[in-house]
Image (tube, rainbow, N blue to C red):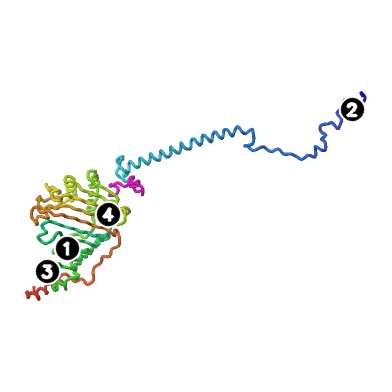
Amino acid sequence: MDNNSNNTSQKSNPNLDDLSQGVPEDMKLDQVPSDIAELPHVVTQPLPSDQNPSNQGFGVGEFSQKRRGFKVFPIGLILFFALLLLAGGGLYAVAYERVDLGNKNLQKSIASLVQGLPFTPKTPRYVLEKAYDAQKNVDSVSFNLSVALSSGSFSMLGLGSIDMQFMGDLDYRDLDNLKTKLNLTVLKEFNMDIISINDKSYLRVNKVPSLILSFIGISNDQVSPFLGRWIEVNKDELLGVDSGISTQGATPSMEEEIQKSLELILEEKVLSNLEMTEESLDGKKSYKFHFQPNSELFDYIMEKLSEFEKNGSKPSDYKASEFLKDLKVDLWVDGSSFYITKVSMSTILDSGTGYSSGGVINDDPLSILGNSQQFDVAIVMLLTNHGKDLNISAPSGAEPLDQFMKSFESMFVSEYNLPSF
C-alpha cells in the first residue's frame, strides 16, 4: 500500500527530485504549450461611452447641463418678446400721439411707418396727410359737380329748385398750358360746352330754354341754326379788356396757402370735430370724414382763411356763421390711393344778414335777392381719373367770335327789319 502511494506521488510530480539541480526545461515559463500557442489572437476594443461604466458619471452631468439649457431657453424667449412688445408699444404710442416726441417730422415718419401697415388702424390726421400728399401730385382729374339751390321765393317763378351740373376734365400737367373741358347744364333746359386751352376758349350752346326764347320774342326755329356751333374766343375778348390774369397753375404762394389750410384743419380744435368712419364707396374701401362745426369754430376757420389771402384788407366784424348756417361737409378718401373721390356740402344761405366788406367775402352775393331770404344749398362733387391722360383738344371748325356775332346780327336784321350796324 505504501509502495503504491509512493509510486503515485512520484508519477504526479515528475522531476521534483531534480529541482535541486534547477528547473527542468519542460517547466520553464517561457515554454508555452503548443495547444495554447495555436489559439487565435484576441484584440481588446474599448466600449462605447454610453456602455462604458467608467463614463456613467459624465452622462449624469450632461443631463444636468441639458436641463439647465432647457430652463434658460424659454426665459430668453420671454425676454425677447418682452423687449419686442416694449419697442412695439413705444412705436404705437408715438404713432398714435400718446407720446409727443417734440419733433414733428420724426413723429410723422414713425406714424407713417406704423399706420402704413395693412393691419394697423388709421387716424384722421394720418389719412388727411396722406390725402394731401396724394392730391398735390395729381396733375389731371375728371369731375362731376352738382348744385341744387332751393327757396320758397322760387315758387313765384314756378320752380321748386334750381339744379345745375358741371361735368368735365381738368389737365394742369403743363402749368403754362392749362386745359379744361366743361359741360354745363342748368334746369335741364340749358346746355353748353366750354373748352379752354391756355388763353383761348371754345364755346358751344347746345340747348336754350324755350321760356327764355319766348320771353325775348325769338322762336326755336330762329335759334336752331346757331346751336351746336363752336365759337373761338380769346381771353381778352371774353372779358372785354386785357385781364392780366395768368394762365399758370399753382404758384409757390398758392401751394403755401394750401399747406397752411391743411395745418389749420390739423389743429386740435378743428381735428377733434372731424368724425372719421370707414365705408364702401363704389365697391371700394373709403374713409369718410364728417364735419359739422358750431358757429364759433366756423367763424374761427373763416377768419384764419381770410388771413391767408394776404391782400391787405382790413378785418371786419362780419361773422361767417351769420351768412352760412347749419354747415355740413362730408369728404371721402380712397382707402388705397388716398385720392379724394367725393365731397358733399349742405348749408343755408341767409341773405337777410348785412355785414361790412373786408372779410373773405367782400360783397354780399345775395343782396340782390332782397332781405330775409334763405336758400338751401346742396353741393356734391365726384372726382375720378386722378393723374390719367385726358383727351382735351381744340374742336375743329370753330369760327371766330366776331364772325358768329355778325351771323347772329344778320338774323335779327332780316327778321325784324332792323338797320344793319
Q: CA distance from mark 1 to mark 3?
A: 15 Å
Q: Specify which label sits upstream in the sequence, 2 or 4.
A: 2
**Quick check: marks 2 and 1 in contact, CB under 8 Å?**
no
Does 77 sit left or right of 21 as displayed? left
Q: Specify which label sits upstream in the sequence, 4 or 3.
A: 3
Q: CA distance from mark 2 to mark 4?
A: 130 Å
Q: In front of the other: label 4 or label 1?
A: 1
Residue nearer the viewer, 122 or 257: 122
Does 218 sit left or right of 126 as displayed? left
Instruction: For label 2, count other residues whose C-alpha is less than 10 Å away and answer few (under 14), some (14-19) or many (20+).
Output: few
Under circle 2, the secondary element is: helix
Which stretch did the figure color magenta?
Answer: 109-128
Q: On the image, which quarter does residue 174 sit in?
A: bottom left
Tag of residue 340 = 4
Q: In front of the other: label 2 or label 4?
A: 2
Residue nearer the viewer, 17 or 263: 17
Under circle 4, the secondary element is: strand
Q: State whether residue 200 is above or below residue 112.
A: below
Q: Specify which label sits upstream in the sequence, 2 or 1.
A: 2
Q: On the image, which quarter does residue 218 sit in?
A: bottom left
Instruction: For label 1, count other residues whose C-alpha is less than 10 Å away and answer few (under 14), some (14-19) or many (20+).
Output: some
x, y (%) of residue 270? Answer: 22, 45
Q: CA distance from mark 2 to mark 1?
A: 154 Å
* Quadrant showing the N terminus: top right
Q: State whether residue 234 is above or below residue 291.
A: below
Q: Amino acid at mark 2?
A: Thr
Q: Specify which label sits upstream in the sequence, 2 or 3.
A: 2
Residue at 64% x, 32% y: name it.
54
Residue identified by numbered label 3: 213
